[in-house]
Amino acid sequence: MSAVLGAELLKLRTTRTPWVIGAVALAGMLLTQALTLVLPRTLRALEGLGGSDAGSHVGAQLSPADTSELLSGLAAATDLGSATAQRSLLDLLGQGPASGSSGVTTLCVLLLGVLAATADFRTGGIVPTALAVPDRLRVLAGKAGATATVALAIGAALALVTAVGLVLAVATTPGAGLAIGPGEALGVWARGLAVMVLLSWLGLAVGTLVRGQVAAIVVVVALALVEPMIQAAALVLTGGATTATSWLPITLGSLASAGQGAAQLFGATSDAGAGLGAAAALAGLVAWAAVLLVVAGAVFRRRDLA
């Protein structure tokens, strides 16, 4: 098994695409952290303008009172001295208080899994691989191990960026101090790493089932784009009163990593989804990954590789 894992790691390490994926994930996190640091100051500056002038700056035709109330609420939501904002800063999926989006990191790890599964099919290397290791489940397990290793390496780099972002946020925010302890910070990072591994395995399962690299990429990109649309539609139709769509895989990853449910991710103020905690969401994502990998393994064992 160690030989299979080593071979799969070598394939990923000597391919340019995983490095590009890692660079894009880091760039997305750096942008999220920068926006998180800048947004509270921008809101305070707009709030200080007051009156109709502030309303014209935020691009809304609001009364001075409504504008002041809106800006005050946004400033409070992005208060970098609060424990909630600091936990969001450490989130490896990039759901900082200024972003509200997990798109970049999620898509990167999904594509990482797709690449690990489809590269051999694209180049024809799957045939000699299967000849060298007749047990195809060992091959799939090796790909899963290699994908998880790379996802963890990317996650470790993202954790370093978030730690620097938190230090800068506390240091540059007047009156702010660390509102979370080391154990809580490690918990946020641990959940984020677990989610990244599970999402990469989802991509691996999709790639194994689809085989075609371009087609598999289209599938995971469509998943990343369509699921938020489903969430938004469900939120509008039910007024945030349903948690059914919170069990979709990307939403589960968001909830497990940052503790935000689907309704909260889309700005609902109700308690919909509050009962679905991070532990339950992580278990749900494990179930998604396990089911899809089992199906992918069964198909991979029976499929003609030629």
Image (cartoon, rainbow, N blue to C red):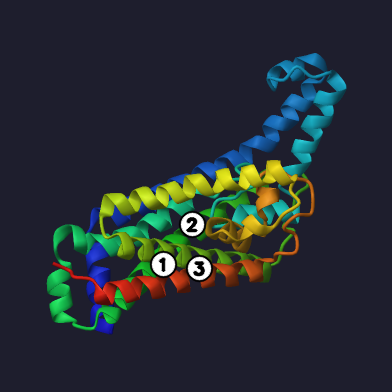
Residue 9 in view of the camera? yes
Q: CA distance from mark 3 to mark 2?
A: 24 Å
Q: In the image, what residue type sits under mark 2?
A: Leu
Q: Which mark is residue 288?
A: 3
Residue 79 in view of the camera? no
Q: Residue at x 79, y 25 (%)?
A: 48
Q: Position of residue 219 (x, y in %)?
A: 38, 51
Give residue 74's quadrant in the image.
top right
Height in image: 60 above or below 149?
above
Give the labeled residue for mark 2: 158
Mark 2, residues whose alpha carbon is within 10 Å: few (<14), some, or many (≥20)? many
Question: CB of mark 1 within 8 Å of CB of mark 3?
Answer: no
Give the labeled residue for mark 1: 201
Q: Residue at x 53, y 60 (%)?
A: 249
In this view, the residue in front, 223 or 60, is: 223
Height in image: 226 above or below 39?
below
Give residue 247's quadrant in the image.
bottom right
Mark 3, residues whose alpha carbon is within 10 Å: few (<14), some, or many (≥20)? some
Mark 1, residues whose alpha carbon is within 10 Å: few (<14), some, or many (≥20)? many
- The numbered mark, 1 or 2, whose residue comes first in the sequence reads 2
